Amino acid sequence: MDWGGIFSSALSDMLGPSAAIYALAAVGLNLHFGYTGLLNFGQVAFMLVGSYGVGVSVAKYGLPLSVSVLVAILVSVVLALLLGVPTLRLRGDYLAIATIAVGEILRLFVNSSYFEPLTGGSLGLTDPALAGSGPQRLPNQGFTELSPFVGGKTYDFGPLHFLGSDLWVMVVTWALVILACVLMFLLMRSPWGRVLRSVREDELAARSLGKNVFSFKMQSLVLGGVIGGLAGVMYTMNIPGQVPTNFMPEITFYLWVIVILGGAGRIVGPVIGALIFWFVFSFLGSFLTDLFPGANANVGAVRIAVVGVILMLLMVFRPAGILGNKEEMRLEVR
Amino acid sequence: MRRRLLAIVMPIMFATLIALCGGGAAFASPAASPATAHPDGAAAFGQSSSHLVADGSSDAAAPSSSSGAQGETISGTLMAPIGEGGTREPIEGVTITVSQDGKEIGSATSGKDGKWQIPVPHAGTYQVTLDVKTLPNTVQLQTAGKETLKGLVVQPGFSKVALFPLVKQGQGTGATGGGGGSGQLEYLISIFITGLRFGLIIAMTAVGLSLIFGTTRLINFAHGELVTLGAVVAFAFGTSPLQWPFVIAIVLAVIAVAALSGLLEFALWRPLRKRGSGLIQMFIISIGLSLLLRNGIQFFFGPDRQQFQQATAQTQLTWGPFSATPMDLITIVVSIAILVGVAVMLQRTRMGKAMRALADNRDLAEASGINVDRVILQVWVIGGALAAVGGILFGLTSAVSFDMGFRLLLLMFAGIILGGLGSAYGAMLGSIVVGLVAQYSTVWFPPELQNAWAMLVLVVVLLVRPQGILGRLQRAG
């Protein structure tokens, strides 16, 4: 067994574009769950609208990248408002079910033949028919033009190897993650952040002090949703040919593992969670493939089953995660 | 009590009436029928889209294990009518063609076992034609002029069975007249039967989920996997290599899943409750359990969809405008019987009363001497058994796959919230409405969206009447 190769690829994946994208989406989810106590089980929906928002704008309408990113942010805001209005007034578990349902509804819609002219249906954003009718641009074209790295070249950093194209996505996404974390740090020190945490701890108390709880929850949902949408934008920059099956509900569950692993309600929790998650995930993948060569479907299944076990064990024995504060995080229905 | 039952029956009849009228009105105008043509989509589908995600070295798409929207087919088995020996002989060499909007999609010839299968590019509405000239001289179609089946709806990820009832030469009947009008009625009625069947399957699985929620306040996200397990275990016992009698396979599957469900309560949920774990904590644990069970099932069962042998080669039964396969009827009758049984159990037996008392007020129930742990264990066992039966019926009417229960789970939630969270009767009612909505949406919209509409019902209900049809406002919080 090639332990060196396995560890090298696991370390590369730990810092790679996917880990960065998951970390960014998890920062948004941490704002929802960790700071506001919202049970958002549809974070993948925000990634989906961000991803398709930028992808369709560039590939279908030929808009410049900057405008397309604005479009993606706008649709994320709209989705958060649409999602929040019916559910934020209700008990937490309703929000959980409604958000996961909305994620599936959106995925089914972009997958359907109805929206095929816009989204490419099940073939995704690089459907030849879609590209043929549009201005012949890949969804990430404007982004790769900005890259200072040579796309096809492999850059080596000790045991780590990255393609130039991956490296560009990584640099930008990790920069966004750091920006988002700084923003969270500043927000949570502000009076606004204190109100959010009081909503999480005791909604009635916050309300009796004259705070509009619904409005604060909505602001949290919108901001975290926009961060999730930006993660979706970077997802498309990483994999330009997005297909609807890339937005299965499992992604949201991985994000939950990441948030809880790192510690909900902690600024750097999601980042640490994403690093650990991707190291373990990538390690398991290569390890099992080495162990059972040629059994790809089974390796995938076992890998996800292990994620399930990790989620259960974490929740049973360390619900506050690695960094979390047990006194602060009480997982109660609210 | 009678009023309660009425409250269940009336809305169903009402919804049916509305759906029938509305469907009829829309179907009368030709423009309203769904246009699911993909002029270039069909041609482009040949190339797999997998390379698009396979090239980033560490693509984030890798975790997704679903087989996605692949593998839709139309298939069937051609069998001669029952001969002297009481057996049915397969018919070989009959040509069958699938087309969509006048464009041929593909054709196939039935094999030695009478089976034929034609892959189709998308979920959608297709037309299947049997070439009468290729039939042997000894048989003919039961109804002359029925060699073309129009409006065959293929659902995403499913294999649709096309039925061509055959009789001995000279025993067929002429084409049933009646023109377009009765054709539409037949179409709407057939959708009603499919929708009712689907709704009843959802109802059976949702009742258990609702009872578990009512007594423990836990949203059991792993309930879909109990459904899957029921079908998978029955499949394992009932098909080769074991090939035990199907009834025994079903009974074993139900017992196995009920036992597992009880074991989970005994070994996992009860200790967690005793530790005073939060409900959100337990909800997330059930998500982890769902990932574990689903992918464990995939490991043993494989990622492909498989058909119960017992569900193929059926004849269509027809009474006037009503037509259904024996499997439809069995499913509907069995599930109604079981649901009525559950209702009687809840109303009349000591155990059922204890369950309802616990759902109403846990402290009061405990104070009045009800053994809470025992009642909750009973709820889990019954919920598991119902999930298994629902899964077997679901597998018989569509196909068995590792994620069948997970796809049903959100529809269960939709039904439960529509009917009123925490109310077992509400779950039954809501689920049947969800099943009907899903099927009737295919009259206007592409069939691949039917589950999306059913889930949209959930969002609309939360907006308009969050406590659901039968729920009480206090529960919505």
Image (cartoon, coloured by chain):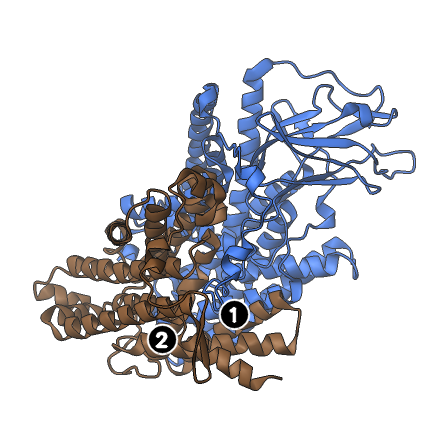
Chain colours: A brown, B blue
Quadrant of the rendered image containing residue A32 = bottom left
- At which x and y percent is residue B16? 46, 32
Q: Would residue B285 be found to the left or right of residue B109 on screen?
A: left
Q: Chain of mark 1?
A: A
Quadrant where the N terminus of chain A sits is: bottom right
Pointer 1 residue: A304
Q: Callout 1 environment at 10 Å: few (<14), some (14 to 19), or many (20+)?
A: many
Residue at (70% x, 31% y) in the render:
B97
Q: Helix, strand, or loop for circle 1?
A: helix
Quadrant of the rendered image containing residue B316 = top right
Please say whether residue A96 is visible from this viewpoint: no
Q: State whether residue B422 is above or below residue B104.
A: below
Between B195 and A32, which is closer to the camera in this rendering?
A32
Residue at (37% x, 42% y) in the render:
A135
Q: Helix, strand, or loop for circle 2?
A: helix
Quadrant of the rendered image containing residue B84 = top right
Please say whether residue B96 is visible from this viewpoint: yes
The residue under label 2 is which amino acid type? Ile
- At which x and y percent is residue B128? 66, 30
Q: Would residue A77 be found to the left or right of residue A112 on screen?
A: left
Residue at (29% x, 55% y) in the render:
B476
- Give how far apart the Cα atoms at labels 1 and 2 are: 17 Å
Pointer 2 residue: A260
- At which x and y percent is residue A226? 26, 59
